[in-house]
Amino acid sequence: MAVSLLALLTFPSRAGKFESEEDSSLLAGVKFSGMLDLRASAADREVSWLRGGLGPLRYGGRDTDLDGRGDRRAFGASVPQASVVLDAEVPAGARLHVQANFTMDAASGSAKVGVIEAYAEAQKAFGDDAFRLKAGGFIPHISWEHPDPAWSTRYTLTPSPIGAWVGEEIRVFGTELLWERPIAKEHQVRLTGGGFSGGDQIGRLLWFRGFAAHDFQGDLAAEYPLLGRKVRPLEEHDGHLGYYGRGDVRLFDRTLELGSGYWTNNGDDRTGLPAQLDTLVFRTKVFHYGGKFEWKRVTLLAQSMKATVHSTGRPAKDWSAAYGLGSVKWGAARLSVRYDRTWVRNWENAFGVTGFAGWDFGLRQQVALEYIYW
């Protein structure tokens, strides 16, 4: 049994909390927002996967003798996320959205600037029917834990393994169409569908490393160290288009929300050779189900996911994960706890518990403490 312990102390200016709207004729309709997260961490000896190890967390120990195993605990400070978000109005009622992140992280041993999302979208209503068209590079709506700008979490610092995997790998370069309509007073139904290119190696991290729990956001050109090689999830190798769909209902003025969806890169897993991992295509299918209950100070979240990954010359693997989260917001304070389960038949069976305490202070700041047992 491997146990990973992580304690985090962070001072974030939460996403969307500092904003600037320019009124000059040159920058009319342009809004900047963002967040800055400064963090101190203490972790056990297991080396983080972001440094090429097998530790499931963002922070981990150090392998000073290079024998492949962590040999001492790690304490450090980092800038896990400094985001700038640009929203600009363009003709025909559309807008542009760009999110860029800067990270300086002891876990990955590097500092990096990358673009997380860059897309254009337009909205139009026809009576009770509302439509939204989106095109570009973006994160599809799978995670329930990231409702805030800069794709930031609200209830904990570290999302569930479901949210972590979406943040690592799942991006689309394509288009998405959303339709929403009220079905009764205080109730709405929403359908979303999209098609995209790229993503032929999405699923490779799950296949060789397993699930992880962290808040790292991969950019649109992300690459990760894995078994001495580089993983580039968003590359295109087979010329096949991926697609996805999702349905949601919102009840009692959004007190209760339920949703489920399907996502696949539609990869041709006959492309590439097992010995040539950098060009191998992984065919990945994801079913996800979730719900949210929010009443006064209390929020309850639950989600489950099953991902099936196919690769040339190997039997398919089914990856399953689920979590339940409870959060209470009382004045300036928020307390949250989440229980996670991940399992793969005959290979992985893990659980984790995350505790979070946050306190809003000043104009737009929060200090938070998080503890993870995995």
Image: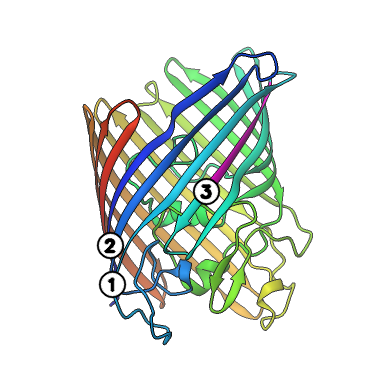
Mark 1 lies on residue: 73
Tell me where residue 201 sits by quadrant: bottom right
* Disc with the residue nearer the chain's start (1 vs 2): 2
Image spot of residue 324 (x, y percent): 31, 49
Left or right for 343, reference 176: left
Left or right for 93, reference 15: right
Q: Marks 1/2: CA distance?
A: 8 Å
**Residue 163 seen:** yes
Q: Is residue 115 magenta?
A: no
The span shown in magenta is 94-102
Label 1 CA crowd tier, 10 Å (few <14, some 14–19, many 20+): some
Mark 3 lies on residue: 102
Q: Is residue 369 above or below residue 182?
A: below
| Residues tagged 1 and 2 counted as in contact (Cβ below 8 A) | yes
Q: Is residue 234 above or below residue 296?
A: below
Q: Who is closer to the viewer here, 200 or 86?
A: 86
The C terminus is located in which quarter? bottom left
Q: Residue at x 30, y 75 (%)?
A: 2
Image spot of residue 160 (x, y percent): 38, 53
**Residue 305 seen:** no
Circle 2 SS class: strand
Mark 2 lies on residue: 42
